[in-house]
Image: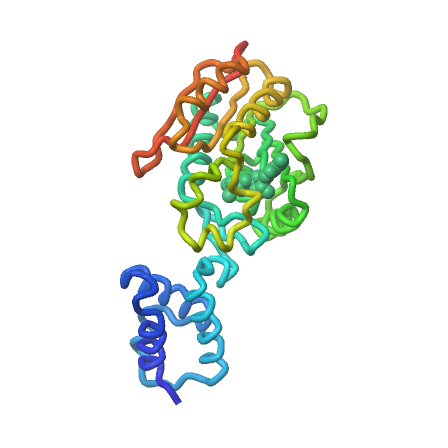
Amino acid sequence: MKTIRDTWQWFLSSLQGVYPEKELQAMAKVIFCHFFSLGPAERVLNARLTVQPESIEILEKVIAQLRQRVPLQYITGLAHFLDLELEVDHRVLIPRPETEELVQWVIDTLQKERGSLEAPWSVLDIGSGSGCIPIALAGKMPKATIQACDVSAEALELASHNARKNQVSVGFFLLDILKDNPPLLDLDVVISNPPYVMEKEKRLMQPNVLDHEPHSALFVPDDDPLIFYRTIASKAFQWLNPGGFLFFEINENLGRETKQCIEKEGFVSIELKKDLNGRVRMLRGRKPGKKA
Ligand SMILES: C[S@@+](CC[C@H](N)C(=O)[O-])C[C@H]1O[C@@H](n2cnc3c(N)ncnc32)[C@H](O)[C@@H]1O
């Protein structure tokens, strides 16, 4: 029988060379904590205790998945987004840190606009995936009406589950934004992190993303990479109140083009914003008219 210390070493050596050392150590910490409730302190204190064969079997499966570059969040089934814990699997994109920054920008903007987040804002998120954006906003804006849509019924199922788990109310509905034009009215905020990776950018992507995350959440055709931005901006312009806000996460290589595209649809006060890594990843625009 292996001790906890031996098991830790065996786990790391089984994946040596597959991931950089630091990343591997970080992943091992998450795995031991998630599957066996062994945090760093418990691992050291109980280093000489023996590990049950069933636990070794679990780790063998995890090692096989990590060798195939399955993202850690799909292995544990959990992702963290701001202060939320969300369930994730192959149906949805794993929420990214830059999307957390986008949500924070929405919150800061609305807070500044009305001096409080208590106002009855009406918000629509397009392409909600795991539900990270609308669930985070619903948690911060108790009086808001938050709606969210996605073309994937499977993603909506998981997003609704995540909303219930986090005890917030979000109105999820199925919608193909490229085809449907529902009669939505009186929105104050439209937000979206739509697919924006060009097919030609595929070769720059890591296998953990390319082989495991849903392609319908990621890719757009090379000959029309702004298809979602143009369509969403045009529909959002009809749906928003005068002074309403449009927020996008964007492709860092298409900042200028995305800004022009939003301008053409009639939005004003358009701003691009860099993420913490200094990459242009967000855009905010406003429908002209009196303040939201
Ligand atoms: C980049 S992911 C973003 C997911 C989530 N909002 C996030 O930030 O992690 C894009 C999402 O748009 C959805 N989507 C793709 N095509 C769509 C369409 N035509 N209409 C509505 N949603 C669509 C995908 O299913 C996916 O959930």
Q: Which quadrant does the C terminus fall into? A: top right
State whether residue 151 is above or below residue 233: below
User: For residue 25, what is the image quadrant?
Assistant: bottom left
Residue in front for this viewpoint, 80 or 20: 20
State whether residue 120 is above or below residue 44: above
Q: Is residue 139 visible?
A: no
User: How far across and down, in percent of the image, does residue 171 sit?
Assistant: 66, 38
- Residue at the image point whose x is 47% and y is 51% from the top: 210
User: How far across and down, in percent of the image, does residue 262 sit?
Assistant: 50, 19
- Residue at the image point whose x is 45% and y is 58% from the top: 71
Q: Is residue 253 left or right of residue 21?
A: right
- State the count of labels: 0
**Of all residues shown, which one is farthest toward the top?**
289
Residue in front for this viewpoint, 29 or 196: 196
Quadrant of picture, ligand 1:
top right
User: For residue 134, what is the image quadrant?
Assistant: top right
Residue in front for this viewpoint, 163 or 260: 260
User: How far across and down, in percent of the image, does residue 52 sit?
Assistant: 46, 84
Q: Is residue 217 visible?
A: yes
User: How far across and down, in percent of the image, does residue 213 sit?
Assistant: 51, 51
- Residue at the image point whose x is 42% and y is 66% from the top: 67
